[in-house]
Amino acid sequence: MHSQHQGPAELIAVHGAAKRLHHIAFGIHLADLPKFEEHLKKIGTPASPAPVNGLREGLWFQDPWGTWINLTPTSPLVDAPQIASDIRVDRHLWRELPKVIQPNRLGHMLMFTQEWEKVEAYYSKALGLQVSDRAAGKVSFMAGGTGIRDHHCFGLINSTHRGFQHSSFQVNSIDAIGIGAMQMQKAGFTEGFGIGRHALASNLFYYTRDPWGSWVEYYADMDKISDAWQAKDWNELPYIWPQWAPEFWGKEMNANHESK
Ligand SMILES: [Fe+2]
């Protein structure tokens, strides 16, 4: 899928016998490409030829568990400014709302992993991703880059084996999430939950279940972090509102549908 910006494809579907995570792509600065190449060689997971010719530009390598990672040169994306309440005077906001929602970018994805701590340590060493928060013993959220950045662009969920858990697309507002949810429902993808507000990262969300049992999220209004951020382990529910049966997250959200 190409979003509104002119960058590399954010999502690529590759034909296969069963639903399976094919690769994970991270955007990098072009100038960092030779540094990553050198660094990956040094830590024992050197760049390799892409698993499918011409799929994406940049570097390809496999993590020690066999997952393909791509580092694609691209420019960082800036979130759209929000309409401030002081310029809402004498306007009809409802008439200005978009009719069709197109996500700005793929903001993050979460992967099921085994050997959770080792995987977290590897991604931190290989890519410089930093843990921003953990749902203790369950989920690790990781941020990329430096300066002011999203609370997470990647995350790991402890599981019996590798798999895809959810991908999350950034939109501008709670209205965009609501209109996007309606768009999904009209297209026949009626199973979902939200709108709600997460605890860790504080983002607004709506999840749609895809036809293969995994989840697609629209999100907006995520916490940003700086180099001063301190990661912590938390024991909170994953959401502040609305109210759900707590076991939903264990049974439905964290069900790994990928075969071993
Ligand atoms: Fe998410």
Image (spheres, rainbow, N blue to C red):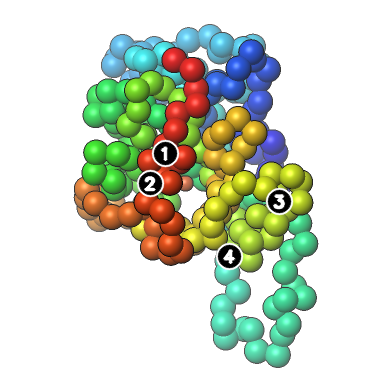
Labelled disc at residue 90: none
N-terminal-most mark, 2 or 4 = 4
151 relative to 103 in the view: left or right: left
232 relative to 217 in the view: left or right: left
Residues at marks 4 and 1, CA–CA distance in whole angstroms: 27 Å
Q: Does the rendering let one see residue 78?
A: no
Name the residue tied to disc 1.
251
Name the residue tied to disc 4.
174
Q: Does the rendering let one see residue 189?
A: yes
Please name whichever residue, 181 or 130, is drawn nearer the observer in this view of the structure: 181
Q: Secondary structure at mark 3?
A: helix
Quadrant showing the N terminus: top right
> Residue 154's x, y, as percent?
42, 38
Residues at marks 1 and 3, CA–CA distance in whole angstroms: 23 Å
Cβ of disc 4 within 8 Å of ligand 1?
no
Residue type marked 2: Glu
Residue type marked 4: Ile
Q: Nearer the viewer, mark 3 or mark 2?
A: 2
Q: Secondary structure at mark 2?
A: helix
